[in-house]
Image (cartoon, rainbow, N blue to C red):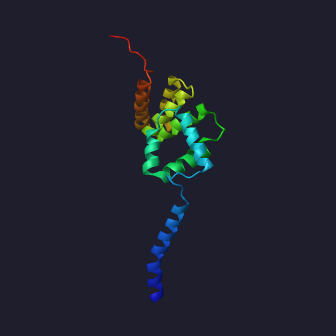
């Protein structure tokens, strides 16, 4: 019995010591010099065309591990692959995010698609296609996000005066 209670008392200390050891390896400022992260952040800057990245910067400040994992894996490893061109990648991402009901991600990637040269009418086709696998509510949500984006960019069609 004393062995079990001794192990129970020492386990939290061992975990704390291991955690502190890992923190000692973490560079000042909390940002690891990882080429995957650097590649991912460079890609994010390219996608944003030099615009502010408030969502990512806030995540980097409040959730540094999540920001680093996103930059390293999602952007650096997956998004940075060269098999698909930027246009195709953005259209696929739009369809996936719209189908999942992730309005913010849909809008962000629709913006990246516009930046990659995809015309608004093709973005609207993605919204129409979403009705089949994900249903009308998800497509309507995506259409609202796309309308917001197009208005923000000054790309809405002018309605004739009645």
Image quarter for residue 113?
Answer: top right
Vertical position of residue 106 compared to residue 157: above or below:
below
Find the residue positioned furthest to the front: 28
| Residue under the image location 34 percent in, 10 percent down | 161
Question: Which x, y percent locates residue 66?
Answer: 49, 51
Quadrant of the frame with the C terminus: top left
> Which one is nearer the viewer's eye here, 78 or 142?
78
Q: Residue furthest bottom?
A: 1
Q: Quadrant of the N terminus?
A: bottom left
Asked if residue 40 shows in the view, the reply is: yes
Q: Is residue 99 left or right of residue 32?
A: left
Q: Nearer the viewer, residue 106 or 80?
A: 80
Residue 28, relative to residue 78: is it above or below? Answer: below
Most extreme residue toward the left is 162
Q: Is residue 4 left or right of residue 89?
A: left
Report the number of discs: 0
| Spot occupied by residue 45 in the image (x, y as percentages of width and height) | 54, 37
């Amino acid at each position: 019995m004393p062995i079990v209670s001794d192990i129970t008392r020492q386990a939290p200390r061992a975990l704390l010591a291991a955690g502190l050891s890992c923190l000692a390896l973490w560079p000042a400022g909390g940002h690891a010099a990882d080429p995957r992260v650097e590649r991912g952040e460079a890609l994010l800057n390219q996608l944003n065309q030099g615009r502010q990245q408030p969502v990512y910067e806030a995540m980097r400040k409040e959730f540094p591990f999540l920001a680093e994992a996103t930059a390293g894996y999602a952007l650096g490893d997956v998004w940075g692959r060269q098999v698909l061109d930027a246009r195709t990648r953005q259209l696929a991402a739009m369809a996936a995010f719209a189908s999942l009901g992730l309005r913010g991600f849909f809008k962000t990637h629709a913006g990246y698609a516009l930046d990659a040269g995809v015309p608004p009418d093709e973005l609207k086709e993605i919204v129409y296609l979403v009705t089949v696998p994900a249903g009308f509510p998800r497509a309507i949500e995506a259409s609202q996000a796309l309308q917001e984006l197009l208005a923000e960019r000054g790309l809405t069609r002018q309605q004739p005066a009645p």
